[in-house]
Amino acid sequence: MKPILSCLALIATLGLAGLGAPSAALAQSKSKPSDKFRQLDEVLPTPNEYRAASGAPGHKYWQNRADHVIAVELDDERQRIQASETITYANNSPDELRYLWLQLDQNIFAKDSDAFQSQTSRGLDRVPLSVLDSLLRRPEFDGGYKITAVKDAKGQPLKHVVVKTMMRVDLPAPLKPGQQTSFSVDWSYNINDAVKLGGRSGYEYFPKDKNYIYEIAQWFPRMCAYTDYRGWQHTQFLGAGEFTLEFGNYRVSITAPDDHVVAATGVLQNPKQVLTPEQIARLEQARAAKAPVLIVTPEEARRAEQGRPTGKKTWIFQAENVRDFAFASSRKFIWDAMGHNVDGSQVLAMSYYPNEGNPLWEKYSTHAIIHTLNVYSRYTFTYPYPVAISVNGPVGGMEYPMICFNGPRPLEDGTYSARTKYGLISVIIHEVGHNYFPMIVNSDERQWTWMDEGLNTFLQYLAEQEWEDKYPSFRGEPQYIADYMKSENQVPIMTQSDSLLQFGNNAYAKPATALNILRETILGRELFDYAFKEYARRWKFKRPEPADFFRAMEDASGVDLDWFWRGWFYSTDHVDISIESVRWYRLDTQNPEVEKALRRQERDSRPVTRSQERNQPLPKRVDQYPELKDFYNQYDELDVTDADREAYRKFLETLTDREKEILAAGLNFYFVDFKNIGGLVMPVILEVTYADGTKEEMRFPAEIWRLNNFEVSKLIVTPKEIASIAVDPRLETADADLTNNFFPRRPVKSRFQAFKEQQQGPPNPMQLERKRQPPPQNDNPRR
């Protein structure tokens, strides 16, 4: 096909401006104000020396630090934690601190916790007994911290005040900039039954063998983050908004029954004291293995299930530059491991799971870990930690540095559905992926869930698509978010975590889809991937805010995306672009041989009306009296005359060669009128099908809406006749109503089921009563 000629040149040359779109001046009127391209400068915080306008950390960026030395004992008889810690806190801020704030997240299980007391009810209709059991257990369970001591480095008590899920520790002297202080905390708490009471950690009880799996997290008093943008981040923990934490080094000693296997954040420091020589040898073999190696076999785990401990063992783990620490412990664990080189970094990928997890876990878990590290490292930065762990237990999916908890298992007979299989692979990808966001790119989860869940779900989608062809991802593709986006029960993505409605769609699916659209449709893969990787590189082991992400993506891509952030992240608009009409014009060549022939063809193709059809056989007076006919009975205004030809010849003499070429091109001019019904401005992507069967894709940037956010017209100039036009033919933009995407309109396909009417309804009470009655006894039975 010949290139489409410049619309602007044609309009200027041929005077077609009057056929264009409505006046932009009218679109931006006092009675109809709208500017979806308004810059975000007035919304985003002003850049400063801590956070640069480019979205990078400023030249005076700082963050505080908290190192931990912890000793904890797991009581397997009473399901209880007893622990003590020493925290060394470094004040790198420019501010003097007179007190410190710690997070007491386990207080969410206190009897009077705000999280429990503020739960709302939807009524009772049909309630599973398991839900009812949990409902009745929760008021009786006391799982909050019991703080028994808070002391300074000299062992002197420190004044402290517990405020729900926070604790303030008053310092004897102000902690000045550049100084550090050490203090200790002793505590205990009852571990929650994660199956019956829920939670991000807890235990699972197995009645058949009377054993437990413990997944322990949010288990120690942790420093609140003190930041440049809000001071102490001590928003109470209500359950939805996760964690805002400081980096530090951890040395943790975990005492457990001597038949338990313990997995934890960090590297095991004393393998000879807690592992058998055979297990140590297997672990060494796994580092260079091409497939997962069993460190604890299924048979060994079964034997451990039947035994009982004879004492205790203390497992010591060291973790460098992490923001949190979690562990898991059980005698039921099978343990496999496989070493892997991630861009030159040696990582030991390990999985811990009970026999109930097989055959799924032994087949997929460790491979899913390694796959995640490969894909995520390619799009962000090389995984910096020495281990990556996936644990099967009661928690459906939860992430911590170097370790995550994942729930899916097969049925008792070892079979599983496709949903369970892919659910396991996906949750492992997702939770291992959280090592990057927020464990390393350390966003404020308590405030902005989307900054880790949304970005991570986006990368999860990319990793899933590299697992196998046609992987059944349920988040990431634009078409899957359309129904949510047109729903009423929602709030903008830029909403504090505890106030989100439709949590999964808002914080996971919508931002992930937005980034996928930004990558595939707005920026393109090369530009997006560079900018996203630059953002991750800049904020590795630092704490970004939303403005830093928005600014970094624009800074590294060179594209103004304020309209995109405003629409997708700050509004609840949805995408619904409709083709309202198509107006077709052809250029009058002024050649009488051409133009009159076309007009005759149009006239002859008009339908014969019903009246014309019925009137045609009627006798006509001029046929009865031929003398009534004159010149006009033979005249046809569409006959070409010599005068017409002469006028055309003179017209051609006035034209340049370029103008003659334009007139002879046989061009068609189509004005396509679009309406933005959903409110969210997006690129207009068209598939144009021509009368000869060929197709062409046309892509117009979102800026097409900049002067009128609601109605625009686009001129398409082509030598071919257009048969049909479709908006968003490849489902790129999350358009919520596809029925108005076509010109001419297409019938909406659907299916319905037919059924045979029941002759009778359900039994009535009299029939039921008769069925319950015994049959009548016959006193004189026939013999």
Image: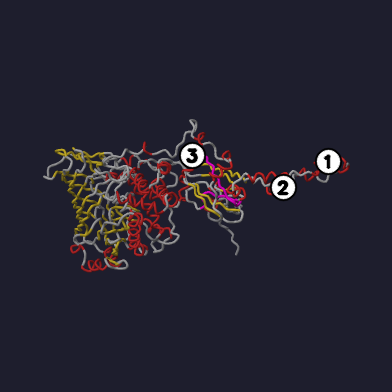
Question: Is any part of residue 123 visible from this angle?
Answer: no
CA distance for labels 1 and 3: 59 Å
Mark 1 or mark 2, earlier in chain? 2
The amino acid type, in three-letter code, at marker 1 is: Asp
- Magenta residues span 711-729
Q: Which residue is at the front of the view, 559 or 492? A: 559
CA distance for labels 1 and 2: 22 Å
Disc 2 on helix, strand or loop? helix
Q: Residues within 10 Å of mark 3 (few under 14, many from 20)?
A: many
Question: Is any part of residue 779 visible from this angle?
Answer: yes
Q: Residue at x 14, y 43 (%)?
A: 152
The amino acid type, in three-letter code, at marker 2 is: Arg
Residue 282 lies in magenta, yes or no?
no
Residue at image mark 3: 709
Q: Position of residue 80 (x, y in %)?
A: 24, 51
- Asked whether disc 1 touches disc 2, contact meaning CB atoms under 8 Å apart, the reply is no
Which of the image's four quarters has the C terminus? Answer: bottom right
The amino acid type, in three-letter code, at marker 3 is: Asn
Residue at image mark 2: 600
Count the marks: how many? 3
Q: Is residue 435 left or right of residue 490?
A: left
Q: Position of residue 572 (x, y in %)?
A: 44, 41
Disc 1 on helix, strand or loop? loop
Residue 462, placed above or below residue 292: above
Q: Position of residue 370 (x, y in %)?
A: 33, 61
Picture quadrant of residue 653: top right
Disc 3 on helix, strand or loop? loop
Residue at image mark 1: 630
Q: Position of residue 45 (x, y in %)?
A: 32, 38
Q: Which residue is at the front of the view, 273 or 631? A: 631
